[in-house]
Amino acid sequence: MLDTIFIGLSVGSVLLLVALGLAITYGAMGVINMAHGEMVMLGAYTTVLASIHLGIGLLGAIPIAFMVTALVGYAIERLIVSRLYGRLLDTLLATWGVAILLQQAVRLSLGLAFFGITIAGLGTGLQNVRVPAYLSGVISIGGEQVSLYRAFIILVTILLTLLTWFIMYRTAIGAQVRAIMRNPDMAAACGIDVKRVNALTFAYGSGLAGVAGVMMSGFKTVFPDMGTPMVVDGFLVVVTGGVGSLMGTVLSAGLLGQINGLTASVSNDIIARAVIFAVVVTIIIWKPSGLFSYKGR
Amino acid sequence: MLKLDKVNSFYGRSHALHDLSLSIPKGQITAIVGRNGTGKTTLLKTIMGLTVKSTGAIDLDGTDLSAQPTFRRARAGIAYVPQGRQIIPDFTVRENILMGGFASTSGRQVPALVGALFPYLTENMERPGGLLSGGQQQQLAIARALAANPQILLLDEPTEGIQPNIVEDIQNIIIRLNRDEGLSIVLVEQNVAFARRAGHHFAMLEKGRAVAAGPIDSLTDELIHQHIAV
């Protein structure tokens, strides 16, 4: 039983890392970033490449993946998204295009495939990441055996969630992000550089998704369109939790992760997926603005 | 001195201000009067850079702000107290005030002046802004603007929708901010009596154009009858 709960928690953890970034960017900027799942993919590929070319293990890949995906996120925001604010459908299409572009870039070894050059670790094939020995195996908690790697995922997620909370609620930049979430015009009139803060927020959210990709690479196969279902899952979490609520995102990721884990343990992944959709649809009908939505005056 | 020269401002396709030229003298109160929908609020938003598009020059002490984004105008010393106050309901009183401090060049803090003017706010620093009454929220919006340590205060109908016993308080505070603190104030006001009592100058808007302007003495009953009274 404990092992099942652990599986649920670790699934929820990856979901949370993906959803936190979406919650912040969607909450602060009203932008639906369809390329967010590709940040997960890039994070996973960074792990693969770091292992093949630099000999860096999964643990060392975490900060590298964060930096890489944060930089890509920053570039996407500055080059594309920042020009499309207030045009929801246009950003949706544009970021979808970016998502396809990134997938193809990986498939074609960043375009070098046209010249007959391939980069080991990229390309159309499947990639695997070896979990280091000190993270594999099982540990025993209260007499029950749980996977060490899953415990590690949960720990990393807890640390990153605490870090995000700290940034959002205890720093000046976090106060700026929250002010922009509530009232962007008033935030600007109070001297907040909305464009700069938005770009940084986007970069941070992308970086979190990149770390989620590192975590995923340890228990799932890595391939170019692995990110596509992640963006859907991420949005399920954000919508269920309530837009603009960090706490809502955390709890809803935990809830959906547990439902997924428990259902999958008694039946299979396909049924689990159906149950998740049923639960989310019910919650949205019952509470259209999510479980923990921010209440305006 | 804040000078607007041939300013045009737009919301999407609607042309809200037409070739508006206006001087806001330093250290004085300039009252902007006119009927509803004549562009008074748009004028303040245009000064802040919050309309969709505007043309013309907006000059603050020799620097043209018209191409600057909103946050730079705020940091140049223009603070905005909008209509409906627009405080953040789930921020505490302190967080709301400190939000204004992002425009301050001398650090983010609750100014001492706030304590002197608004004892209620200093006693309720940790209360969520959304729980305050309309009048208290208006005080909070002014306190937030003061945290920017501004030279010019843009006030949009500061006494609208506020319980009558607080209206006079707020009016006196506005006069005090100008007289004692030397703040230049642009006051959008429907209440002509208060505009006359507080203002040194006025500008009358109609259909997005300035139809009269000058020292407050020249805001005659006749002008008001012609442009405001129905």
Image: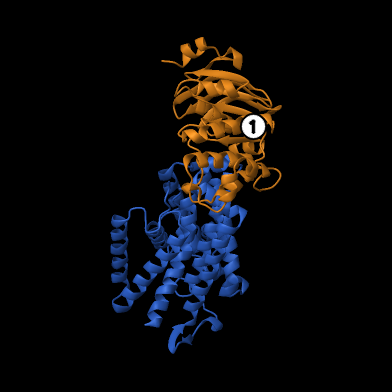
Q: Position of residue A13 (x, y in %)?
A: 46, 69
Which quadrant is home to the C terminus of chain B?
top left
Q: Nearer the viewer, residue B24 or B161?
A: B161
Whether A245 is drawn above or below A92: the answer is below
Q: Position of residue B99 (x, y in %)?
A: 59, 46
The number of numbered discs placed on residues in the rendered structure image is 1
Q: Nearer the viewer, residue A127 or B78?
A: B78
- Chain letter belonging to callout 1: B
Whether A146 is drawn above or below A96: the answer is below
**Residue furthest top in the image:** B222
Res. B202 image quadrant: top right
| Residue bearing mark 1 | B176
Amino acid carrying label 1: it is Arg
Q: Position of residue A79 (x, y in %)?
A: 55, 46
Would residue B164 be found to the left or right of residue B216 on screen?
A: left
Task: Note whether residue A196 is visible.
Answer: no
| Residue at 46% over, 68% down | A14
Would residue A190 be found to the left or right of residue A217 on screen?
A: right
Helix, strand, or loop for circle 1?
helix
Which quadrant is home to the N terminus of chain B?
top right
| Residue at 56% over, 58% down | A169
Rendered hue of chain A is blue
**Residue furthest bottom in the image:** A143
Task: Note whether residue A70 is visible.
Answer: yes
10 Å neighbourhood of mark 1: few (<14), some, or many (≥20)? Answer: some
Q: Position of residue B43 (x, y in %)?
A: 54, 26
Rendered hue of chain B is orange
Q: Nearer the viewer, residue A57 or B220?
A: B220
Whether B59 is drawn above or below A148: the answer is above
| Residue at 49% over, 81% down | A148
